Every structure is written in structure tokens, then in C-alpha cells.
Amino acid sequence: MPKENPRETEAAVASDTAKTKGKFKKILILGVLGLFLVAGGLAAYVFFSDDAPEGKEAHATQTASKNSHAVTMPLDPFLVNLADKESRRYLKLKVELEVDSEGTAKDLEKSLPRIRDALILLLSSKTYLDLSSFEGKQQLKQEIKKNVTALPGGSKVSDVFFTEFVAQ
């Protein structure tokens, strides 16, 4: 059996140790890099995400402070053609009506066909230019409130909210 040179065995052990340290460094660097990517992604998500839950809570707080018993009554979405003559345009609108109590909301549900009819006629009489500005949207809210309060049981509607508004 040939004798091994002690220098060769020490060199082999040293090279194995260097390879192990090199692999460990690579794994450590990849782990740290992965950690930074996850942290950066989380930071970007938090920074760029919409604050919808906080906005809804703020809206609920404002509504509650205005009227402690106010209830919103969502209506089914409206999809109507606008009155533009030069082109075919439409409006998709989701509306919620604020009423003073659950009982009023249930009473108002009995008038839902009348409410929807009045709003469809109102919305389809508008043009794209009428609705494209902030003032036009505010005026539409006032007209919706006026039309609903004119209906039986509608006098208890205190406010109108647009939850979706798409005019194209």
C-alpha cells in the first residue's frame, strides 16, 4: 500500500473545506437576496395598494356621525344608453341610497320598480358631456335624490352615493 504524502492530504482537506465554504457563501447570499426581494415586494404592495378598507371605514364613520341610524340601500347596477346623437355611448352606474333606518329601506324596496324606472329615464336623458365633469356628477346626484324623494316613501332618502360610475 503506497503511503500518501501528508501535504497532498492537507491540500485535499483544505480544498474540500474551501468548496464547502464557497457553497455556504452562495447559499447565504441567495438567502439574503431572496429575503430582500420578499421585503421589497411586501413594501411595494403596502405602498401602492389602494386603501379601500380604510376608505370604507372612514365613509362609515362619516355616515355614522351624520346620522347614527342611517342605512345605505344598494340598487342593482344601471346600464343605459346616453342621449348623445353623434355617437353611441353608455353609462354604467351603481347607486346606493342612504335612508334613516332598516324599516325605511324595506318600505322603499316596495317602490323599487318605480325608483329604477325614474332613474333609467333620468340617466338615459343625459349626454356624455353632462356627466364628464365633477359638477355634472354632483348635479346628477341631486337630480337622483330629487326624483327619488318625489316617489312614495322616498322622502326619507337623505343622500345618494355612486359606488361605480363608467361613462363611455
Image (cartoon, rainbow, N blue to C red):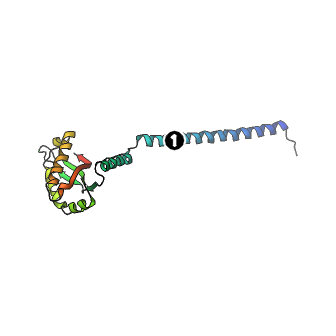
The quadrant in which residue 105 appears is bottom left
Q: Say which element carries label 1.
A: helix
Side of 50 where 36 appears, left or right: right
Q: Position of residue 98 (x, y in %)?
A: 25, 53
Q: Pointer 1: what residue?
A: 39
Side of 165 where 82 appears, left or right: left
What residue is rendered at 76% in x and 37% in y?
14
Q: How many marks?
A: 1
Nearer to us in this view, 82 or 114: 114
What residue is rendered at 14% in x and 55% in y?
118
The crowding category of the residue bearing disc 1, from other C-alpha atoms within 10 Å (few below 14, some 14 to 19, many at least 20), is few
What residue is rendered at 17% in x and 61% in y?
113
Q: Position of residue 24 (x, y in %)?
A: 66, 41
Q: Can residue 145 be seen here?
A: yes
Type of amino acid under label 1: Ala
Quick one: quadrant of the C terminus? top left
Q: Position of residue 44 (x, y in %)?
A: 45, 40
Nearer to us in this view, 5 or 110: 110
